[in-house]
Amino acid sequence: MALCAALGSFVVMGCSAQDPFDFGGPRSCEVPDENEWVYGLMQQAYLFADDLAEIDPTTYESPHAMVADLRVDPDRWSRVSDKARTNALFEEGKFIGLGFRTKRDVDGQVVVADINAGSPASEQGMRRGDVIRMVAGFTTEEIDDQNGWSEIYGENLPGVTVALEVEQEDGSTRDFSLTKDWIAIETVPNVQVLDVGGRPVGYLMFATFVDTAPAELSAAFDTFKRAGVREVVVDLRYNGGGLISVARHFMHLLVGGVAEGRIAYEVRYNDAFSDENDERKLMRLDQSLPAVDHVVFITTGSSLSASELLINAVAAHVPTSLVGSTTGGKPVGSKHFEFCDSVAVPLTFRLLNADGKGDYYDGLRADCPATDDLGHALGDPDEASLAVALHLLGSGECLPDPAGEGATAPARDGLRTPPPEPMGGDALPTFAVLR
């Protein structure tokens, strides 16, 4: 209760002795009052509260701008987001966008890397490997020169139309006119049982950790269990994170059958909330694999947060390897604090595995380097990253990167090459959210 009181006049409702993280809400939904309340929240619950700068919160134009300015290194993620869109993403698995993401290939071209099924891009026939030549009348070179990727796709609202000129696989050029809309995420878009040396190997691509994912994950692991799978390739190359509860469900499916009752991960808050530190245990589910010989994760610099939590947790219990490139490096997570029409998402805790490993701000390094081979479909055994993963399972050794034309440029020191990706207007939040 003393912690709640410390927020003083900024809190006007709901501060609960039963929930030390219930900070009520601002005096009003006017910006100055919102700013004061969010600043007070940061002073108490923020993981790096002891290093927070002293500011006058009323001088900022929005809570979003204030939190972005307040971040303490190595924090790159604390933010204030729109409540309706955040809830739509995590609870309904929906977001507003065009339905594609892009990456740079080895020649610096902007290439379509992934397409959301049922999206505007998918319905008009865009494909992985298509090369973007122009956006809204500007060449990609012009957009680079003007540092304009963050604005070129327009406002992130339904009904916003974007004109594209795209070079397709056969060298022909096609014009697209895509209109932003709500897109339902297929969280497990690719599930296969592959033969590796006469053994069944499960492969699944996982898009994001949202509330719609557990049912899809359970169905995938039911397929694996029935096929006698003991080795799994989990493709997280574009997965920026999401709900920790979903990551925990994934852990149960992967290793709950062999490590039931052991620690999955630990949650560590700042000193003021150390009494709330917690640990979660692994459970055996009906679809959990009864035996696991090896798990291989495919990763890139876009693999972050809940994805890294999953990798780190699993590695404490079964043989685990990474193929691809170094992950993005986010060993911390957030609680959600709703107010007015917004959600404050400050970093509030560290995440450790059963061996006490965490703080991987430089990312989790790949055991076998491999490129994201844009010349092949995701899930194709000949695609470079998957080919390296399957070779590792079959031989116990890394394979010289087989990627040819269309592969993405290697990450430098685990960081993505500019401009930021995805550039298709479909960036999902990078979160590990505790719920």
Image: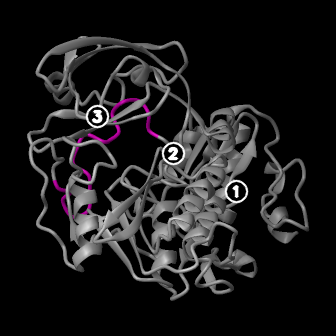
Which residue appears at 55% of the width and 56% of the height?
A: 220
User: Who is closer to the viewer here, 99 or 414?
Assistant: 99
Counting other residues with Cα less than 10 Å from the Cα at mark 3, is it few (<14), some (14-19), or many (20 or more)?
Answer: many
Which residue appears at 19% of the width and 23% of the height?
A: 168
Question: Which residue carries the number 1 mark?
Answer: 41
Q: Are marks 3 and 1 in contact (CB under 8 Å)?
A: no
Quarter of the image for the C terminus: give it: bottom right
Vertical arrangement, residue 404 with respect to residue 87, above or below: below
Question: Which residue carries the number 2 mark?
Answer: 429
- Residue 73 picture location, percent across and down: 42, 63
Q: Earlier in the sequence, mark 1 or mark 2?
A: 1
Residue type beneath disc 1: Leu
Which stretch is magenta? 410-427
Give the distance between the C-alpha atoms of the residues marked 3 and 2, in whole angstroms: 22 Å
Callout 3: helix, strand or loop? loop
Quarter of the image for the N terminus: give it: bottom right
Callout 2: helix, strand or loop? loop
Q: Is residue 419 magenta?
A: yes
Tell me if 40 is positioned left or right of 414 in this view.
right
Of circles 3 and 1, the one toward us is 3
Residue 199: numbered disc: none
